[in-house]
Image (tube, rainbow, N blue to C red):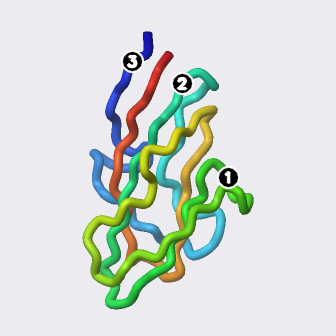
Amino acid sequence: MSTYSKIPLSSSTNGTGLLVVATTTLGTNIHTAGSGSTNFDEVWAYAMNSASASVKLTMEYGGAATKDLIEITIPAESGLTLILPGLYLCNSLSVTAFAATASVLSIHGYVNRVTA
């Protein structure tokens, strides 16, 4: 039987937002999945833009190859925009992020850790 635990993103202090400071790959670390191939992290993340212009965000999901990139433009002065809708990750792979403008996007979220 599997167990589920709701935990903060691994780079978050006490569940608070993570400021995206990187503007190129390898981006700001957001979360590192648990080890092993039978345990999964279901990652939920939202971005907030404090700038007066829209900003392109690139999520590197498990790696930096083209197949691992998720790109989204976060509207100016927006509230929370869903960027990772419960995607699974395992084997200690990481989620990193970089933005077209440094230090204006923050990422909030949580992980449902599924342990077999």
- The residue drawn where x is 32% and y is 58% is 17
Expressed as whole percent of the image width and height from the top left, the position of residue 70 reads: 57, 62
The answer to which of 32 and 83 lies nearer the viewer is: 83
Name which quarter of the figure residue 90 lies in: top right
Seen from this angle, which residue lies furthest bottom?
A: 52
User: In this rendering, is residue 4 above or below 26?
Assistant: above
SS assignment at label 2: loop
Residue 34: percent from left, percent from top: 53, 31
The answer to which of marks 2 and 1 sits earlier in the sequence is: 2
Any mark on residue 63, and which?
1
Residue identifier under label 3:
3
Q: Specify whether 33 is left or right of 26.
A: left
Question: Which label is found at residue 39?
Answer: 2
| Residue at the image point whose x is 34% and y is 36% from the top | 7
- Image marks 2 and 1: residues in contact by CB distance under 8 Å: no
Sequence-first tag of 2 and 3: 3
The amino acid beneath tag 1 is Gly
Marks 1 and 3 close (CB-CB < 8 Å): no
Work out how far the residue at label 1 is from the one at label 3, CA to CA, in angstroms.
27 Å
Kind of residue at disc 3:
Thr
- Viewer-nearest of labels 1 and 3? 3
- In the displayed structure, would residue 67 be above or below residue 77? above
Q: Position of residue 76 (x, y in %)?
A: 33, 84
Toward the viewer: 22 or 108? 108
Q: Which residue is drawn at 37% across and 50% down?
A: 12
Element at label 3? strand
- Identified by mark 2, the residue type is Asn
Among the two numbered marks 1 and 3 on one chain, the one whose residue lies closer to the N terminus: 3
Secondary structure type for disc 1:
loop
Per the model, the C-alpha gap separating discs 2 and 3 is 10 Å
Q: In this view, does 64 lie to the left or right of 8?
A: right
